Image: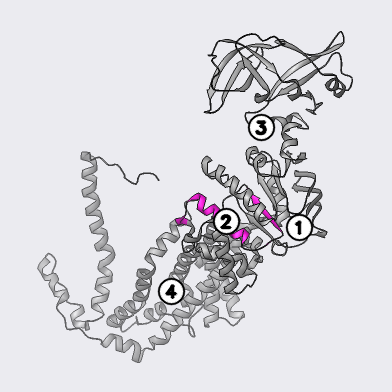
Amino acid sequence: MAKVSIRNVWKKYGEFPAVKDLNIECPDGSFLSILGPSGCGKSSTMRMIAGLEHITAGDIYFDEQRINDLAPKDRDVSMVFENYALYPHKTVFDNMANPLKLRGQDSARIKERVGQAANLLEIGELLHRRPQELSGGQKQRVAIGRAIVREPKLFLFDEPIAHLDAKLRAHMRGEIKHLQRTLGTTMIYVTHDQLEAMSMADTIAVMHEGELQQLGSPREVYNNPVNAWVAGFVGEPAMNFLTCDVRGDGGEVLLAHPNFGIALKPEQVKCLNGRKGGGSVRMGVRPDALNIALERPAEPAIAGEVFVNELLGGDMIVEVQLSDARVRVKTSPEFPGNPGDKCYLTVNRDKWHAFATDTGKAYF
Amino acid sequence: MASRDIVHYDTPLSKAFRWFSAVFIGFYLIWTLLPIFVMFVSSFKDLLEAFKIPAVGDWMGAAVFFDFSPTLTHYENLFRNLNFTSYIVNSLVAAGGSALISVVLGSMCAYSLSRIEFRGKSDLFFWIISTRMAPVVAVMVPLYAIFRSLDLVGTLPGLILAYTTFNLPFAIWILKGFFDNVPYAIEEAQMVDGATRSQAFMSILPLVAPGIGAFLVLCILFAWNDFLFAAIIGSGGAKTLPVATRELVQPQNIQWGSIMAAGVVTTLPMMLLGLVIRRYLVTGLTMGAVKE
């Protein structure tokens, strides 16, 4: 087990910077998820930690040991690859035994450790099979098994469940989280799926275009995104963005949109740094912070028209057409509106956000 | 998995074509197998019987081919008087040696070319394969001069070196394709698991085994059947089967029986090899074509 510190790390491919000045601290025994779309530098980061790629600049430390110049085999990490990377010509047992064999363990110990790992992952009956005889989920387990037979300082999981079907993915999320808690080993988990990061990690590092956007707990990242990009990337369905004018109206400051004008709370006004009059901001509100009704409510509401209903079983997503944009609202399946109906949206004023139109930085 | 059923509907044209194909294949079989058959049978005949040929148009007379009393004199002659045992050994050593060296060096080189990026890589790769573009005859004279000044003419190491010169580029070229098809992640997993780069390289060799096997066979075939190098570079001390067979043709006396027997001795090992590794060879040569 180890604490991982990534300090001012850069990765350049030729002139192209894939990772820019990255700083992440991952405490001993915690579960860090690096989240971002493809090409954001998350995999490069993981591969630098594993030693599969050179670090262009900066340092990576395991506890207080600088590991920049260590070969992968000397870093004492184990890794699960996106495509499993099982050895096709070896049985499941030999696949899982490989890291122990390479480290010169005796066969009795290997048998014991592989047996334990196989039991933990419930693949005891597959040990004599070869990878091509396994289903995707089973291959996945074998790949994880190969990672946990040793007791490494650090687990690196590179999108390990991206290729599984949705149901199995949901199941494996729970399993992996449980496994990490059971073993207590520090884990760095790379994914492009915000749901995986949200549901499993203690800490999420959101990356975009090689830069760390936000480092925080899933709750922080979800509730207090630092910028519009993070806000839009995290959460499903995605956050709605509307461009509004900031308008001072008597004592109040309003966010004005062709469809509505909503007063800000005093503490929110403070966050706008004096942009009381003039200028525009991007207002962001999550679909679950909006309420929808067919009758005009007493409080100020946004008028629109139902565009389409998507029933998702337990929830319903209603897309509402405003004058110049569409917003998505999460509501209950009992919502009676049909496409074309007039409807009214109300906003929970604690749960909305405002971002700068140019930089995307969050005001609140 | 997609259906394996290949849908086929007959048309008059396709029926006619099927007939044509059958006839063509029949002729092709006769064309390719008859010489081997004649060689095989003749090697067990004495000279008089071997030259019994039916008159033109006498199809029943073909039976005369089978009308003989088998004899092993020609084989006895080869191995007792003509020292063919040592020629077989020479052929085996030259073919096996060069194939082995080519595969060992070739797979290491192919792996590097497949995995490592460096400046001028594509030029280097082209240069390697371009060495095969000149016909052998064109480089034979300079090659002979070089080999002679190094005292390699007429020696087995010389012959092995000559074959390796020509097999190695081919090995690199073919094996690179096989290595390209092995996902990087497998070696990376090995390295994270605790392997050195060379251990990781060794660990993926089983995945390219079909390619290595197929290539080994091609190398052996090339060297075993080669006449030109053997006659010029190997002449004298490192005489191989094809050269020894050729020497049975003397101005005053063409030893047909022994030539046929030598032909059988030369052909048989390769045919056996082909039978043994047939399945392997086909998977090997087609495997590289389709990426998983």
Residue that appears at 54% across and 15% down: A336
Q: Nearer the viewer, mark 1 or mark 2?
A: 1
Q: Are marks 3 and 4 on the same chain?
A: no
Figure coloring: one colour
Left or right: where does residue A240 sit relative to residue B215? right
Of all chains, the one bearing label 2 is A
Q: Are marks 4 and 2 on the same chain?
A: no
Q: Nearer the viewer, mark 1 or mark 4?
A: 1
Residue B133 coordinates in the image, percent (x, y): 53, 60
Q: Earlier in the sequence, mark 3 or mark 1?
A: 1
Circle 3: residue type: Gly
Q: Secondary structure at mark 4?
A: helix
Q: Distance of mark 3 from mark 2, alpha carbons?
A: 29 Å
Q: Vertical placement of A103 versus A258: above or below?
A: below
Q: Which mark is residue B224?
A: 4
Q: Which segment is the magenta one?
A: A132-158
Circle 4: residue type: Trp
Residue position marked by numbered label 2 in the rendering: A143
The answer to whether any part of residue A141 appears in the image is: yes
Rate crowding at label 4 as few (under 14), some (14 to 19) or many (20 or more) other CA atoms within 10 Å. Answer: many
Q: How many marks?
A: 4
Residue position marked by numbered label 1 in the rendering: A2
Query: Answer yes or no: do the residues labelled 1 and 2 have beta carbons within 8 Å?
Result: no
Q: Secondary structure at mark 1?
A: loop
Query: Answer yes or no: do the residues labelled 1 and 4 have beta carbons within 8 Å?
Result: no
Q: Are marks 1 and 4 on the same chain?
A: no
Q: Are marks 1 and 2 on the same chain?
A: yes
Of all chains, the one bearing label 3 is A
- The image quarter containing residue B38 is bottom left
Residue position marked by numbered label 3 in the rendering: A235
Residue A134 located within the stretch drawn in magenta: yes
Q: Are marks 3 and 1 on the same chain?
A: yes
